[in-house]
Image (tube, helix red, strand yellow):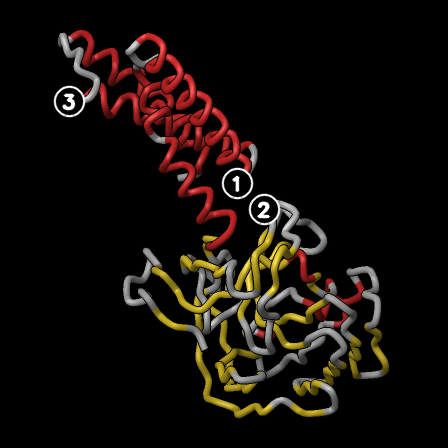
Amino acid sequence: MSLFLYGAAFTVLGPVLVSVGRRRGETDEENSRLLSMGYSLGIWGPFLLLSYLLTIPRALLVAIALSGTLWILDRVVVARRGHRFTSGAARYGSDAFLLVCIICLLRFFIVEPFVVPSSSMRPTLVVSDFIIADRFAYGLRLPFTNKVIVAWGRPERGDVIVFQYPRDRSKTFVKRVIGLPGDVIEITGRSMTVNDEPLDVKPGGPESYESEDGEHVSVRRFSERVGRHEHDGFYQSEKEWIDRDLLSSYSATDGCHLAGETLRCVVGVGRYFVMGDNRDNSLDSRYWGYVPDDHILGRVDAIAINFSDLSRIALGLR
């Protein structure tokens, strides 16, 4: 169920529960289960609708502004008149101010929650994996602009990162870093070099998985060392790692050109070359170009949970 449907349902159900509670003669807003639940839903419903219409970060900004205003009014009125300004759902909003502040601090500066939407990072990540990107991994960044305030690290080859899609920053992707600023990437057939050094790739056996569309996909597994990371990936034996038809559908990327059978890319300053571990089912830097540093949201070190497959809980990434 989407955020919109949850938001609409909560927004309608909240006042209904409050009305039922009032009819039963319940007046204690703190101890009445119906009133408490109704006011809580009356807050969560509009928040979820805002998250759907805007984004969760922008909805959080609205929430902290409204909750903070109510909290200040309560403090001022209590100091002058001895009682609170708010009542009902507004009082719950005022009481939630500290919690909203903590959530905003975590969301804007420390963690970036993300649900994997596709199979492009199989077998490392699968559809519906809930992951949390560490926004603190490379430095302290400003919310929204994502500019680095204080840097204490840079992405390394092999890191799995969550980032804003360079051609539409409203979309969030997850891929693996292959090339750093200044690196020269060359891809020919199913082989790849970084600065003239071939990646250490070991072939594996055949496997299969079910795609998001329910299609049965046959692949072969391989293991690969990128930087300090050794990870597994998938490829389809009949395909090469450059789809010429797909490449031609994207505008040219600065520093990349196709010469014969080889795609050669020179990664620019403040840019990163990323790829999906599922090489033949990933739209990545081979096609749409590099990831600018200020698009990076954080590094992924583990899978938190997958509600469709509860065996995928607290799994570390390689």
Q: Residue at x 48, y 36 (%)?
A: 60
Q: Few, some or many C-alpha atoms within 10 Å of disc 3 (few <14, some 14-19, many ≥20)?
A: few
The Cα–Cα distance between marks 2 and 1, rounded to whole angstroms, is 9 Å
Q: Which residue is mark 3?
A: 31
| Coordinates of residue 69 in the picture (x, y in percent) | 46, 22
Work out whether residue 100 or residue 317 is closer to the camera in this orientation and state it.
100
The Cα–Cα distance between marks 3 and 1, rounded to whole angstroms, is 32 Å
Which amino acid type is shown beneath numbered disc 3? Asn
Which amino acid type is shown beneath numbered disc 2? Pro
Q: Which residue is mark 1?
A: 57
- Can you say whether 79 is above or below 187 in the image? above
The disc, 2 or 1, on the residue closer to the chain's N-terminal end is 1
Work out whether residue 128 or residue 134 is closer to the camera in this orientation and state it.
134
Label 1: element kind: helix
Label 2: element kind: loop
Label 3: element kind: loop
